[in-house]
Image (cartoon, helix red, strand yellow):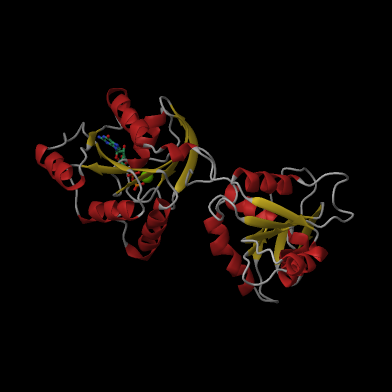
Amino acid sequence: MSKGRDAKPHIGIFGRRNNGKSSLINALIGQDIAIVPEVSGTTTDPVKKSVEIEGIGPVIVVDTAGIDDTGNLGMLRIKKTIDAIDRVDLALLVIANNTFGKEEEELVKSFRENELPFLIVHNKTDLAITGEELKNQIQDVYGLSPIDYSALEPYKYNPSLIQKIRETLPDSAYKSRGLIGDLVKAGDIVLLITPIDTEAPEGRLILPQQQVIRDVLDNNCTAIVLKENEVEAFLQRTGIKPVLAITDSQVFQKANAAVPKYIPLTSFSIVLARQKGDFQAYLEGTPKIGELKDGMLFKFLICYCCPVPAIVVIPRRIIQIVLFGNQGVAFGHNKLIKVV
Ligand SMILES: Nc1nc2c(ncn2[C@@H]2O[C@H](COP(=O)(O)OP(=O)(O)OP(=O)(O)O)[C@@H](O)[C@H]2O)c(=O)[nH]1
Ligand SMILES: [Mg+2]
């Protein structure tokens, strides 16, 4: 399954500052989408872009900060670069000027620990051709040849690099991760908790619930769909032990009380957010909400994206935070809530 959120290969570009990582992206896609000034350290946080590479098709490129960054901020950027390794299907390690040192060795070590396929691209070949000594060294240690490249002369070098990328991208990079495929195995039972109240649409389930049921079946598992007030009695009566419970967020507290603690519990929204959004950022950001205190003065913007126009639900806790004491703007419950 693709390491990213959708069924497109994710290609990460790694290497030292100024080696031409961003330029290589521009050269590969034939457009200037990445920022390339003269100064080093231009790319800070990993930047994801959905692009089309001729000969490969739609991909997501992840441009990362230089692995040799310095200072406190630099260390933070390096950490984010390393984190990105976990979220790509193929790494391009961009080297230049025949330099392959500790930074590169560390990166390759991380690629290998993550079982991440990688290619080594020697950029700026227009300035210095890849030396035989370096070629042999890389071949001996890693069993692959550095690929000659120059972001200034893509017409000359693109075909062979693109072919290598195509050959090295694993098939799994083209498959969607699905919703819960990595949490269950064939034969597992998944409990889905869906309130049927006045907010439920007439005669059908809402799309996230349908999608999860489909995903459960795609993974050769069994879905049990119950209303929240039937969960406890059902589990006691049948002795069935689901491996996972997914509830509508409206009844999360009731579901939490009814589902035994040994069964992991999440919500349809979280399952979808994990597939669609930057879930890592979500995991890092959410605990910060708990740190907000009444009376603290904040300005923040809550952006919420919903496929159904005008029906936007923000978790109540967030709205409470917005309403009590802080400054912010939130769109929720079909209204614009503005708090000053
Ligand atoms: N001669 C030559 N210059 C290049 C080549 N590729 C990039 N450059 C130049 O090298 C400089 C750095 O390029 P970037 O693409 O910004 O490098 P980067 O690795 O993304 O740098 P950071 O974002 O700072 O880590 C720019 O001035 C580019 O024009 C190349 O193949 N040949
Ligand atoms: Mg850059």
- Name the quarter where the C terminus is drawn: bottom right
- Which x, y percent locates residue 276? 60, 47
**What residue is rendered at 31% in x and 23% in y?**
155
Residue 139 image offset from top left, x and y in percent = 16, 41
Residue at image location 61% in from the left, 61% down from the top: 243
Q: Nearer the viewer, residue 97 or 37?
A: 97
* Residue furthest left as drawn: 133
In front of the other: 42 or 128:
128
Q: Is residue 270 left or right of residue 81?
A: right
Q: Nearer the viewer, residue 22 or 162?
A: 162
Q: Position of residue 196 (x, y in %)?
A: 85, 55
Quarter holding residue 288: bottom right
For this rendering, which residue is in front, 78 or 260?
A: 260
Above or below, 150 relative to 266:
above
26 lies above or below 212? above
Q: Could one spot residue 306 in this view of the protein? A: no
Q: Position of residue 46 (x, y in %)?
A: 44, 50
Residue at horizontal 29 percent and vertical 49 percent from the top:
16
> Can residue 311 be seen here?
yes
Residue at left 43%, top 33%? 32
Q: Is residue 168 left or right of residue 270?
A: left
Q: Residue furthest top?
A: 155
Q: Which quadrant holds residue 292?
A: bottom right
The total of numbered circles placed on residues is: 0
**Which quadrant of the frame does ligand 2 lie within?**
top left
Query: On the rendered structure, is 95 left or right of 210?
Result: left
When the figure is inspected, residue 83 is found, relative to residue 261, above or below; the finding is: above
